[in-house]
Amino acid sequence: MQSRDHFATRLGFVLAAAGSAVGLGNIWKFPYMTGQSGGGAFLLIYLGFVFTIGFSVMLAEFTIGRAGQRNPVGAFRALKDGPWSAVGGLGVLAGLVILSFYSVVGGWTIAYAVKAATGALAHSDPKSLGDTFGGFISEPWGVIGFHSLFMALTAGVIAGGVRGGIERASRILMPILAILVMILALRAVTLDGAEKGIAFFLTPDFSKVTWDTVNAALGQAFFSLSLGMGAMLTYASYLDKQVNLPRTAAQVTFLDTAFAIIAGFMILPAVFAFGFDPASGPGLTFITLPAVFAQMPLGQAFAFMFFALLAIAALTSAVSILEPVVAYLIDERRMPRRWAALLSGVMIWALGVPSALSLGPWKDMTVGGKGFLDAMDYLASNIMLPTGGVLIALFVGWSISARAQEEAQSDGSHPFPLIRVWIFICRFVAPAAVAWVLISGL
Ligand code: PHE
């Protein structure tokens, strides 16, 4: 075995893991899903999942990854003989599915950064902003071109193995993105008519809750925390023994949730203030925000900075989705890193083309009543990630429980007071809750 790369510092790891978690899931998906799923009730259910199952599965992934020191498939195999390595395989597959549509939306963010720079977004009439998005999305070459660019950047970073580069970039850029999101949220909540959006976001109306809402909240918790496919597992495989895993998992969970909530305050008040439909789906962020920028001094500069930083946040997440796939090809298939990045990049790019076209020319092609991009997202977030997450929890809770408890506490050097609660959630709560949600969904 070749010697493995390692993160130099704990801070470096926290930033990389937070870079993975914070991305389009927080800023693009969370607000529009909250809008589609009735607001406050969705938020509450989401938070419930995040702090019980989400945190526990994250710690489980950290534990397996650091104990196994390998890609998802190899890590399970290193810890236990038998069929468990199939869970890693499922994760690698989920990575292909997720990145295929993630890269398309990542491309939209780059395109919007360009549009902002050229002034194409600088009008305040909500209707015409909708038309701008509609026009962009229905023109195939642009969408596919930006999807290709985003995928090339992702594969390029992975091919270079430049964790250092991404780490260093995240260190500077993520705090700037955080500040910018807060400024925009402040602007949004002080718009005329923002109160309705704030009330929508914070007042739970449980009469609107259906199984779809609960399933969506569960899927979003896994998606936003990067769980269930081995991304966090793979990052933790580059980690040293002395790192305090429970504390790190708590910090990453907290950071990710803070970003999502602030993004909610940035988008939802503006939706109501400008009279958009909160349930309008994937275009929501791209239509609403330019209207907010148009109401601000230096709006054009803010718009450019925002979309550029969002593209970078998306890139740090995309890299973490691709890394398990590439680590698998390197460790298990003996492929050189560059070839592995090229091969997986091209495959995922091709899988992404139908998603890229699905809001435009292929609007009418639906899978299970959803457009292709939505269907891929649903398959990954609502089915593959929760299934993978539960299997990870079961593995830690039952199959390697003693070893996992030692690893999670760094062999006694970081005692974790809630260790029994964690194991209990892994054994019973996570499997029961996810099984209940998935089965009642069918
Ligand atoms: N968590 C990332 C986001 O919110 C997406 C992601 C999903 C990353 C799964 C890795 C694994 O944008």
Image (cartoon, rainbow, N blue to C red):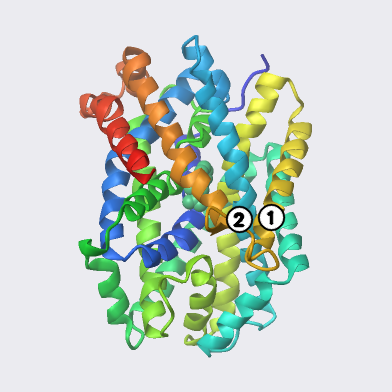
Give above or below for 423 relative to 249: above
Mark 1 beta carbon near ligand 1 (under 8 Å) = no
User: The C terminus is located in which quarter?
Assistant: top left
Horizontal and vertical percent position of residue 113:
64, 70
Name which residue type carries label 2: Phe
Horizontal and vertical percent position of residue 376:
57, 49
Residue 262 visible to the viewer: yes
Q: Are marks 2 and 1 in contact (CB under 8 Å)?
A: yes
Lateral position of residue 378 relative to residue 46, left or right: right
Number of marks in the rendered image = 2
- State the CA–CA distance, disc 2 to disc 1: 7 Å
What element does badge 1 sit on?
helix
Q: Which labelled disc corresponds to residue 354?
A: 1
Name which residue type carries label 1: Pro
Question: What residue is rendered at 64% in x and 29% in y?
Answer: 327
Give above or below for 242 relative to 357: above
